[in-house]
Image: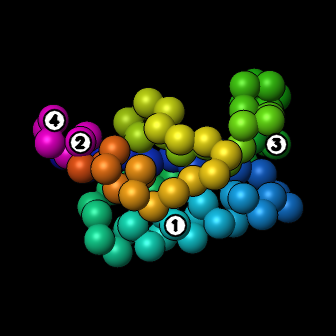
Amino acid sequence: MESTLVLYTRSRCPLCDKAKKVILELQEECDFIYKEEDIEKSDALTEKYGLMIPVVEIDGEEIQYGQIDYWSIKEALSEKNKSF
């Protein structure tokens, strides 16, 4: 079963742009469903993640926020895929 990775982001966010690039690189190597959520479209998401973005969530679990790095996300995806 594929994991679902959600990137919580907002417009005009350089860290979000960098995180998206890392995720797209990972998608070339790892099998997962990618979704992107703009927190500015939801008051609840803005309140929850306003100062933390970007936030990476895999299968409902927050994995990393702020500075997103390739290896941490890859390791989390590998661990999630082992459990299936």
Which region of the structure is painted magenta?
79-84
Label 2 vs label 1: CA separation? 18 Å
Q: Quadrant of residue 55?
A: top right
The secondary element bearing badge 4 is classed as: loop
**Residue 78 placement (x, y as % from top left):** 24, 50
User: Which amino acid, by three-letter code, is at mark 2?
Assistant: Glu
- Give the residue number, with chain letter if any, for mark 1: 22
**Residue 61 placement (x, y as % from top left):** 44, 30
- Give the residue number, with chain letter if any, for mark 4: 83
Please determine whether, in this image, residue 48 is positioned above or below residue 23. above
Please determine whether, in this image, residue 37 is positioned above or below residue 74. above
**Residue 37 placement (x, y as % from top left):** 64, 47
Mark toward the start of the polypeptide (2 vs 1): 1
Is residue 42 among the parts visible in the rendering?
no
The secondary element bearing badge 2 is classed as: helix
User: Which amino acid, by three-letter code, is at mark 3?
Assistant: Glu
User: Which amino acid, by three-letter code, is at mark 1?
Assistant: Val
Please determine whether, in this image, residue 11 is positioned above or below residue 65. below
- Give the residue number, with chain letter if any, for mark 2: 79
Colour setting: rainbow
Q: Which mark is residue 55?
A: none
